[in-house]
Amino acid sequence: MTLTRSICTVAIPAFLLGFGLGGVSLHIASAEGLFGIKDSVTQIGSSLVEMQKNVDELQKNMNALKQTKDKLSSLPSASGAMDSFMKK
């Protein structure tokens, strides 16, 4: 009986102390934004979104350049036109 009583007198305060300290540390962590990580993750996320926009714009410009190159390739060469003009 005394063993059970001594275990209870140690276990209950240990549990309450751990529970209380755990609750306090969670409040501190959420107040700091998960140890300051929240701001860093937000900055990384916004940087990734901006980078994706830039990649999309570059892709659009590349497509425009390819279309222009194809149109220029389909035109007869200027040197060939000049040669035929000079022969006349």
Image: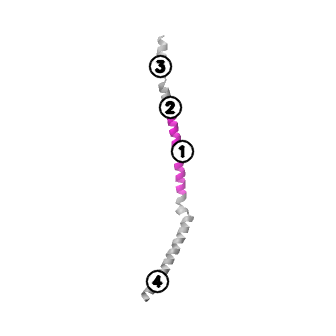
Which residue lies under the disc numbered 3?
79
Which residue lies under the disc numbered 1?
53
Question: For residue 67, which numbered disc appears in the image?
Answer: 2
Which residue lies under the disc numbered 4?
8
Graded by Cα atoms within 10 Å as few (under 14), some (14 to 19) or many (20 or more), the crowding at tag 4 reads few
What kind of residue is marked 4? Cys
- Please give the name of the residue rendered at 54% of the width and 44% of the height, measured from the top-left corner: 53
Figure disc tally: 4
- Chain-order first, disc 4 or disc 2: 4
Q: Nearer the viewer, mark 2 or mark 3?
A: 2
Q: Residue furthest toward the right? A: 31
Residue range in magenta is 39-67
Position of 2 relative to 78 (above/below): below
Real-space CA distance between mark 4 and mark 3, rounded to the nearest whole angstrom: 101 Å
- Chain-order first, disc 2 or disc 3: 2
Real-space CA distance between mark 4 and mark 2, rounded to the nearest whole angstrom: 81 Å
Graded by Cα atoms within 10 Å as few (under 14), some (14 to 19) or many (20 or more), the crowding at tag 1 reads few
Say which quadrant the N terminus sits in: bottom left
**Residue 61 drawn at (x, y percent):** 52, 37
What kind of residue is marked 1? Lys
What kind of residue is marked 2? Gln
Q: Main secondary structure of the magenta part?
A: helix
Give the SS element for disc 2: helix
- Chain-order first, disc 4 or disc 3: 4
Real-space CA distance between mark 1 and mark 2, rounded to the nearest whole angstrom: 21 Å
**Residue 30 drawn at (x, y percent):** 55, 65
- Chain-order first, disc 3 or disc 1: 1
**Residue 45 drawn at (x, y percent):** 53, 52
Real-space CA distance between mark 3 and mark 1, rounded to the nearest whole angstrom: 41 Å
